[in-house]
Image: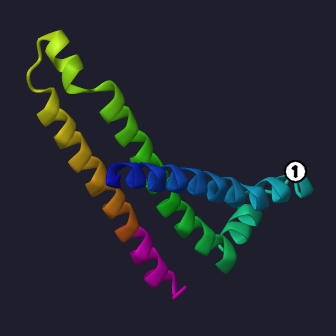
């Protein structure tokens, strides 16, 4: 039963991060529609406001979580041990574990970078 709970949690996390990432892009789309001839400096002023900076940091974390879950699903569904046995490659399990570890390092690294940006920009 515990595996089912984790899968359901991952499903909710991936859907929630999708919604957040979509909501993050809405102000940019509205700004682009209202200011179609905005130059780089106007976009810079818009994107460096505190709400957009905070949303960008949360968006980075959401994108990392979303991508991690997506890659984990692909690795466990398509790079299975059964596929390794069929192809004659006995190292499929260790390759999958290495890729999973690298993905985890990437997610935690992204969260660390986001935290450094939060502290550096003085948002917290």
Q: What is the image's colouring?
A: rainbow
Q: Main secondary structure of the magenta part?
A: helix
**x 29%, y 54%: residue:** 104
Residue extending farthest front: 1
Q: Considering the numbered disc 1 on the image, is that residue within a helix, a strand or a loop?
A: loop
Q: Is residue 49 visible?
A: no
Q: Residue 60 location in percent, x, y?
A: 50, 60
- Where is 40 relative to 91, above or below? below
**For mark 1, what is the residue?**
36
**x 67%, y 71%: residue:** 52
- Where is 113 relative to 70, above or below? below
Residue extending farthest right: 34
Q: Is residue 66 visible?
A: yes
Which quadrant of the structure image shows residue 99?
A: top left
- Where is 53 relative to 110, above or below? below
Depth order, front residue of 31/67? 67
What's drawn in magenta, residue-wise?
113-124
**x 77%, y 65%: residue:** 42
């Amino acid at each position: 039963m515990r595996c089912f709970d984790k899968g359901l949690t991952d499903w909710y996390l991936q859907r929630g991060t999708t919604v957040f990432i979509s909501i993050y892009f809405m102000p940019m789309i509205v700004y682009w529609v209202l200011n179609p001839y905005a130059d780089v400096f106007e976009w810079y002023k818009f994107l460096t406001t505190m709400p957009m900076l905070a949303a960008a940091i949360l968006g980075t974390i959401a994108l990392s979580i979303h991508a991690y879950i997506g890659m984990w699903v692909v690795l466990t569904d398509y790079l299975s041990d059964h596929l390794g046995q069929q192809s004659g490659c006995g190292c499929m399990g260790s390759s999958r574990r290495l890729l999973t570890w690298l993905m985890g390092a990437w997610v935690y690294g992204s969260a660390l970078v986001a935290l450094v940006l939060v502290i550096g920009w003085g948002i917290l």
